[in-house]
Amino acid sequence: LIVRTVRGWDSVARVEFVGRDRALSELVADLPSLERAASLVDNPLPDTVTLRLFDPALTPEVRARLLALPGVADVEDGSQAVETFLALNDALRVGGSILIVVLLGSALFAIVNSIRAAITARRKEIEVMRLVGATRNFIRAPFLIEGFLLGLFSAVATLALVLPGYQYVIARLGPEVPFVPFVRDTLLLSQVAVLLTALALLVGLVGSAIAVSQHLREEV
């Protein structure tokens, strides 16, 4: 009855019932030294139900609902561990957001400097193009394309390193920390890769546009 009731809750992802006999067998398998003692006394272990939630933050709410069910003697929810995990998760999100901003700023700075160097190296060619009547857009286009390609190459290199590394981390740590919500959906990972590529292209174009605007204003 408890298992059927809990399976109907929206917050519960998985329910597993472990009978007292099975629990004792698993305990003896883990600790063979208890086999003789287990044969001399009645099974002291209770029937248990193990839950996995979609959101760990719902642990206190689910605990209260479980204690209100008839037949539930006790609930072990690891509240302290859950609170620590949620605090760590929030800290990682904030840190990740800051890291993304820093990396984007660094990438933009690198692309701007790269385009500046290219403009400086081609200053004579730019002057010749200006004298023969080349338009502003014609002069700026190669540098915008260069910034676009820099963004594209950086995205490809990043994905070539990050995606295999992420899959390796999931394969090694996933079974050890099942409570960590690793993204395993191939479609979602593909969407993230597309968004990362689009963001890199945008940064490349913006960086080249800034450099061109700053250094070609007088020349063109």
Image (cartoon, grey):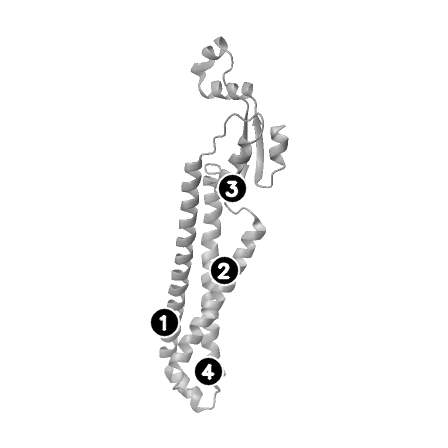
The residue tagged 1 is 113
Residue at position x 44%, y 36% from top? 79
> Is label 1 in a helix, a strand or a loop?
helix
- Disc 2 is placed on an element classified as helix
User: How far apart in space, not on screen, are marks 4 and 3 (Cα)?
Assistant: 59 Å
The amino acid marked with disc number 2 is Leu
x then y, percent, for residue 203: 45, 67
User: Label 2 near label 3: C-beta < 8 Å?
Assistant: no
Please name the amino acid that badge 4 sits on. Answer: Ile
**Label 4 Cα neighbours within 10 Å, binned few <14 / some 14-19 / many ≥20:** some
Looking at the rendered structure, the kind of residue marked 3 is Leu
Q: Residues within 10 Å of mark 3 (few under 14, many from 20)?
A: few
| Camera-nearest label, 1 or 2 | 2
Residue at the (60%, 41%) spot, across then down: 10
Front position among marks 3 and 1:
3
Say which of 51 and 153 sits in front: 51
Q: What residue type is disc 1 on? A: Asn
Q: How many marks?
A: 4
Name the residue nearer the viewer: 118 or 90.
90
Element on which disc 4 rests: helix
Q: CA distance from mark 3 to mark 2?
A: 32 Å
